[in-house]
Image (tube, rainbow, N blue to C red):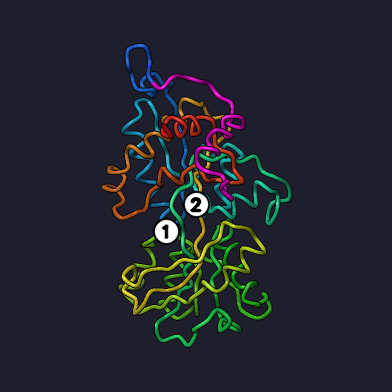
Amino acid sequence: MPTHPTRRMLLAAGAAVGATGGAGPLLGACGRRSWDDLEPAELTLATGNPGGVFHRYGEALAKAWQERLPGITVHTRGTNASVDNVREVASGVSDVGFSLADTAADARRGRGVWNEPVDLWALARAYDSFVHLVVRADSDVRAVTDLAGRRVSLGASGSGTRGIAWRCMRAAGLTSDEFRPVAETLQRSADALAADRLDAFFFVSGLPNTAVLHLSQAQDIRLVPLGHLVPRLVRQHGSEFSRSSIPASTYDLDRAVDTVSVQNYLLVRRDLDERLVHALTRVLFEAQPRVDELAHGVRQPNIGTAIYTSPLPLHSGALRYYREQRD
C-alpha cells in the first residue's frame, strides 16, 4: 500500500467534494468544444506586484484565456499578491487569483492572519516560488542571523512574501525588536537596496523574478541562504515548504543558493459556473505554448501535480478536466 495518496485515488475521491455548478459535456451534439456555447462573461484575475511572476504570468494567462474562449473577457488586477488575492477571490471582487500555498492553507484553516476559516477553492497547483533574501554583493550579511540591527524589507502589507519573511526571521530566532522591519513593495525594495537605503529585502517569486533580475544587472547582489530553515518551518507551519536551490545562472550569481520554496495555487470562486471553470482549466494546459510566447521562461503548471492543492478542494469544473486526463 502506498504511504501517500496517488493521483488516481485523489481524483476518485475528489468527485465527492467538487464545488457545485452548471454541468455540461466536454463535447456537444455536433462535436463542438465545451466552451463554444459558454455564456458571455467578464472575469477578473488577481495577480501581484509588477516585476513579480504572478503579475507577468497572469497577464499572459488572461490573454490566452480571452483568445481561446469566445465571449469571455478577462481583466487583470494588480495587487500585493497572496493575502490580497485570497480576500478578493473569497469575497467575489476577483474570480480567479494566485496565492502562495501557505497563505491559502492558513486561510482555509482559519489561522495566521485569518480569524476564521475562509471558503477557498482551487483550479490548480501552479509552479513553485522561491524565497529570495537579497543583499548587495559587498554586504557583510552572510546569514539570516546577520540581519540583527539592519533595515530589512519584509514585503508589502497584503502580500504572501510578508508572512513568509516573518516566519523565516522567527525560525532563525530573530524577533521584531532585533532588526528594523520595513514594509515595501518589490520594486521599491529593489530601488532602496540599490540606493543603500535598505540592507536587505525578501521576496517570494517564481524564477526568474524580473525586478531582481534587473537589479542584478545594475548592481552586484547576493542571495542569502535560507534552506536550513525548512525543517523548522515545516514543523511550525506545514508541509507547503520545501528545501530548494536557485541556480547561479538565474541572476548571474557566483554559485547556486540553497533556499526555501513554497507551492503556488490558482484560486477560483466556488460559485463560478462549472463549464466555465472546466474551460479555463483546459486552456491553462492547452495554451501553454502561447503563454510561453507572451511570458517566456515562466514555469507553468504540470498536469501530473496540478491536482495537489491540499487543504484546498478542487472546483468541480477543474476536477472534471483532471478526471478526463487520467485515462
- Magenta span: 1-26
Q: Residues within 10 Å of mark 2 (few under 14, many from 20)?
A: many
Q: Which image quadrant for residue 18?
A: top right
Q: Are marks 2 and 1 in contact (CB under 8 Å)?
A: yes
Image position of 24 with respect to 189: above or below: above
Label 2 sits on residue = 264
Label 1 sits on residue = 206
- Label 1 is placed on what type of residue? Gly
Helix, strand or loop status at disc 2? strand
The residue depicted at 41 percent of the width and 47 percent of the height is 301
- Label 2 is placed on what type of residue? Asn
The residue depicted at 68 percent of the width and 55 percent of the height is 113
Q: Seen in the image, is 324 located left or right of residue 168?
A: left
- Name, please, the residue furthest toward the top: 29
In the image, residue 141 lies at what x, y percent? 50, 84
Residue 85 visible at all: yes
In the image, residue 23 lies at what x, y percent? 51, 20
Q: Is residue 262 magenta?
A: no
Question: Which callout, 2 or 1, points at the residue further toward the start of the chain?
Answer: 1
Residue 280 visible at all: no
Q: Seen in the image, is 49 located left or right of residue 183?
A: left
